[in-house]
Structures are given as C-alpha cells and as structure tokens.
Image (cartoon, rainbow, N blue to C red):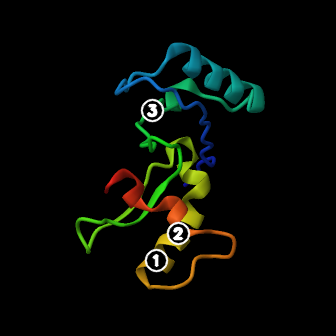
Amino acid sequence: MGIDKPMTRFTAYADLDGNNLNPIPVRKNALINMAKRFFPNDYDDSKADHWVGLRPVSPDDCPIIGRSSKYQNLFYNTGHGSRGIATSLGSGKLLSNLISNQEPPEGLNYRNFDPIRFNL
C-alpha cells in the first residue's frame, strides 16, 4: 500500500461576477501556471479540481457577526467575502464570546460587526 502525496490547494481571486459559477479561463490558467511553477515535477492536471464558489460579502465589506434583531435564537457570522478563511478563527471567537455574554477580545468592538446596521 503506497502513501499518496499530500494535496496542495492553490486559490486566489475574488471577482464580483454575480452568480457565475464557471471558472474564468484567465484565472484558472494563472493558478495552473503557478502550480506548475512551484511543483514542476509533480503537477498533474488529471488530478486537478477547478472549483468556483460564491463568497457572501456585506455591503460595507465588514463581516456581519452577532444576534439577529428579529429572532433571538439566530446569530449571524457571514459577509467575510474573500477573507473568510483568514478571519474564521477570530470571527468564531467573537461569536462565541457574544453567545456566552463575554467581553469581546481585546481591541474589538462588537458594534462594528452588529447585524442591526443592516436591519437584520
């Protein structure tokens, strides 16, 4: 039984393109070229998976984190746009603190992320 090589994920780009879930050829090719440059002997296009997804972004480009003003048992943690993966740990911590009625982490203000700013 052989050991598979680890998978490497190449990702980039956040395009404002409505609900288009088709890979943009120039973007796809740029990622392929980057993968080939970093792993010239290991890149195998037959094993590549090209995926496009929608990333919810808030109108003011600031995440929406907090309790709904309409439903007391609903909390939002959305609107991160292209920074979702990078900010997920901090957003999760902030939401956890909100749910458990704890103070926000130092340097953060809950009001900056409050869903009420969009009447949510």
Which numbered disc flags the more N-terminal residue, 1 or 2?
Answer: 1
- Give the Cα distance between marks 3 and 1: 34 Å
Which residue is situated farthest in the left direction here?
Answer: 71
Amino acid marked by disc 3: Trp
Foreground of the two, 62 or 53: 62
- Percent coordinates x, y for residue 35 in the rendering: 68, 29
Task: State the residue position of label 2.
Answer: 110
- Give the Cα distance between marks 1 and 2: 8 Å
Amino acid marked by disc 1: Leu
Residue drawn at x 62%, y 23% as measured from the top left: 32
**In the rendered structure, are the residues bearing label 1 and label 2 in contact, judged by CB atoms less than 8 Å apart?**
yes
What secondary structure is found at the residue carrying circle 1? helix
How many residues crowd around disc 1 within 10 Å: few (fewer than 14), some, or many (20 or more)? some
Which numbered disc flags the more N-terminal residue, 3 or 2?
Answer: 3
Task: State the residue position of label 3.
Answer: 51
Residue drawn at x 59%, y 69% as measured from the top left: 109
Mark closer to the observer (3, 1): 1
Which numbered disc flags the more N-terminal residue, 3 or 1?
Answer: 3
Q: Tell me the quarter of the image containing the N terminus.
A: bottom right
In the displayed structure, 75 sits above or below 6; it is: below
**Residue 58: which quarter of the image?**
top left
Residue drawn at x 45%, y 32% as measured from the top left: 51
Task: State the residue position of label 1.
Answer: 98
- Percent coordinates x, y for residue 98 in the rendering: 46, 77
Foreground of the two, 23 or 2: 23
**In the rendered structure, are the residues bearing label 3 and label 1 in contact, judged by CB atoms less than 8 Å apart?**
no
Amino acid marked by disc 2: Tyr
How many residues crowd around disc 2 within 10 Å: few (fewer than 14), some, or many (20 or more)? some
- Percent coordinates x, y for residue 73 in the rendering: 26, 74
In the displayed structure, 85 sits above or below 27; it is: below
Which disc, if any, is residue 56? none
